[in-house]
Image (spheres, rainbow, N blue to C red):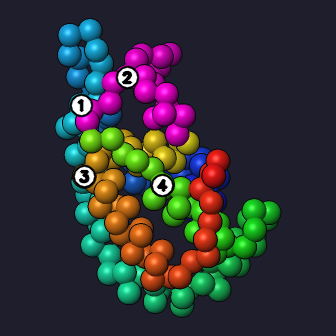
Amino acid sequence: AVVDIARGSSPVPELEMLIPDRPYSVQRVDDRILTDPGSYRRYDLLADVFTSVETEEAVELYRRLRPLFLEAYEDLGVQDGEFEELLARAMQNLLAVEVPEEPLELREAVGRYVYTNPRIESLTPAEKHLVRMGPDNARRVQDKLREISEALDLPAADPVGG
């Protein structure tokens, strides 16, 4: 999942168990299609669990398990730099997202919706997952990511496209 987020890809294949049970929903207002703000609630539990993690304990656990992370990373054969650099890039990618406060306008495409705002539509799949969480959940997740990143003292990393 770290590799996927660092590359801007969707981490869903590795995190399928976290996919919300309820489907994404929209609301139609006049001739516009907007994200239904109720749709954000699908991610409340995920945001609650993630933000409830004690930063110091998470950092200590990471440091203890670091050899296993490095071994797993090596086994993947990824050639994107050191693991900590990738971890820093993954976090920076999500921290750099400016999540809009208002419901986003969409248009229908084949079998899915796309954002009408080119800035939002051009986000990576990983960044769009954060946007779909809604402004409150996304802000909470970003705050926790910032805490963890600072506590880990990760190397500086440019986000995807940065």
Identify the residue position indicated by label 2 in the image: 106
Q: Quadrant of the N terminus?
A: bottom right
Q: Nearer the viewer, mark 3 or mark 4?
A: 4
Q: Residue 23 location in percent, x, y?
A: 31, 34
Residue corresponding to mark 4: 96
Q: Residue at (60%, 47%) from the top-left corner?
A: 9
Q: Amino acid at mark 1?
A: Asp
Mark 1 or mark 2: which comes first in sequence? 1
Marks 3/1: CA distance? 14 Å
Q: What mark, if any, has residue 73 been given in the picture?
A: none
Q: With 132 as the anchor, is 110 left or right in this view?
A: right
First along the sequence among labels 4 and 1: 1
Q: Position of residue 137 (x, y in %)?
A: 28, 54
Residue 110, image x, y percentages: 50, 16
Q: The magenta stretch spans which residues?
A: 102-123
Tell me how far mark 3 sits from mark 2, CA to CA. Answer: 20 Å
Counting other residues with Cα less than 10 Å from the Cα at mark 3, is it few (<14), some (14-19), or many (20 or more)?
A: some
Under circle 2, the secondary element is strand
Q: Which residue was labeled with disc 1?
A: 36
Cα–Cα span, label 1 and label 2: 11 Å
Q: Nearer the viewer, residue 78 or 30?
A: 30
**Quick check: 16 above or below 116?**
below
Report crowding for label 1: few under 14, some 14 to 19, many 20 or more residues within 10 A (C-alpha): some
Residue 52 in the image, given as x and y percentages of width and height: 27, 72
Amino acid type at circle 3 is Asp
Q: How many badges with numbers are in the image?
A: 4
* Eye-nearest disc, 4 or 1: 4
The reply to whether the C-beta atoms of the residues labelled 3 and 1 are less than 8 Å apart is no
Which residue matches tag 3?
136
| Magenta stretch holds residue 106 | yes
